[in-house]
Amino acid sequence: MDANSINHLPHVLVVAPNPDRREFLEATLSPYFEVTSDADVDRVILADESESARAQVIVIDQNGRTDPNSERYLTHCERLKSKIPGLIATAAPDLSFDLRDVAPKVPARFLRWPIERQDLLEAVSQVIGEKTEHIWREELAEEIGKPLTYTVDEYQHISNAIAAGKPVDCEKAAESCKPLVDAVSTGNHHTLLTAVQSHHNYTYVHSMRVATLLTLFGHGLGMTEDDLLVLSTGGLVHDVGKLVTPAEILDKPGKLTEEEWPIMRDHVLHSTKILGKSNDVNRGVFIIAGQHHEKLDGSGYPNGLKSAELNELARMSAIVDIFGALTDKRSYKPAFPTEKAFGILESMTEQIDQHLLGMFRDIFEPGSEVTQQAA
Ligand SMILES: [Fe+2]
Ligand SMILES: [Fe+2]
């Protein structure tokens, strides 16, 4: 796996001779991706092959199928087919050209002007996701590839079910988590936590990391295999309500406004409503989804529950959800080192169960206290 794709934002190369279109493409993508752009197709083709090889997605604006720039670029694409990870062509509304003719083997999307910001962002994210999943399927060892591909496929099924207003099949979700439980039980959790970050669906990435961390937590506490499956399933579906949160709030690169926060917090109510429609939801899974933002001092949401009302599962998921979010990379913040994340959690003395936190830290990084003393 390319270390670049894990530690840095994905690189998108924009090739657009028209300055207005180039500016729009760049301005839309740059808060979320590392963007470089060029007006000159020949320069990209001839002078900087390494730039196109480094890009995870190339966005090429076409003036027409007979446009000499497009022709030259598409010939270039043909030649580079196996090297180009993803391709997005943008074109005038009267063009009937379909990119799949040119690049049948690479993830590709075709967008017509005028292009909505959100459609462009979604297309780039989907192309990166498809490329990542291809690598997971083809190149990773089975014990890592299986937990990733099973859960990403299941997350897609869950998204489709929610979009169609159908209930989530919780039994199938649990089934998809079995390789994850196996991977954690055989000590592969750190590899999983890193590898999943190359995907570009952040809600899935966060959910998969929470599922892995919760399973690791339970494994370290000596829980049974059935309980570990509840923890992993609960982690995977704990934020399903975010699938109905507007994308401009969910993926906002920066702080939310006072008006936006309540909409973001509502994801918990959406999650419990969605899971409540399912007739096979496990009670533990429901608690993880409904109570992972509650705090011991009653300052959490949605119900402001207090310590006596929060069982071990709720306390564990609160710890893991915060730890997972802090150690995730986002377009607007790097991943915090685990040391810093634990420091933040340890300062939340009134809100987080510190006894459980100490156990989680020991499980996550065995011997860490000894190392710190030695340092
Ligand atoms: Fe959440
Ligand atoms: Fe979460």
Image (spheres, rainbow, N blue to C red):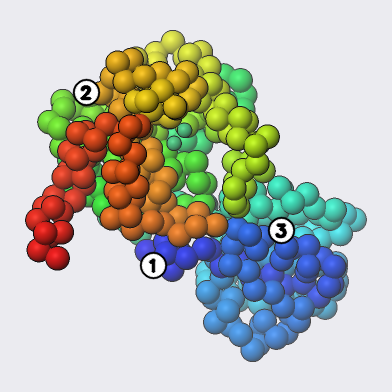
Pointer 1 residue Cβ closer than 8 Å to ligand 2: no
Q: Can residue 213 be seen at all in this image of the molecule?
A: yes
The residue at the point 78 percent across, 67 percent down is 23
Relative to 205, say whether 85 is above or below: below
How packed mark 3 is, by other alpha carbons closer than 10 Å (few <14, some 14-19, many 20 or more), is some
The Cα atoms of the two marked residues, 2 and 1, are separated by 35 Å
Mark toward the start of the polypeptide (1 vs 3) = 1
Mark toward the start of the polypeptide (2 vs 1) = 1
Where residue 92 appears, x then y in whole percent? 86, 59
Where residue 117 appears, x then y in whole percent? 74, 51
- Residue 163, by quadrant, is top right
**Number of the front mark, 2 or 3:** 3
Q: Can residue 215 be seen at all in this image of the molecule?
A: no
Where residue 25 appears, x then y in whole percent? 74, 63
Q: Which mark is residue 28?
A: 3
Relative to 115, say whether 3 is above or below: below
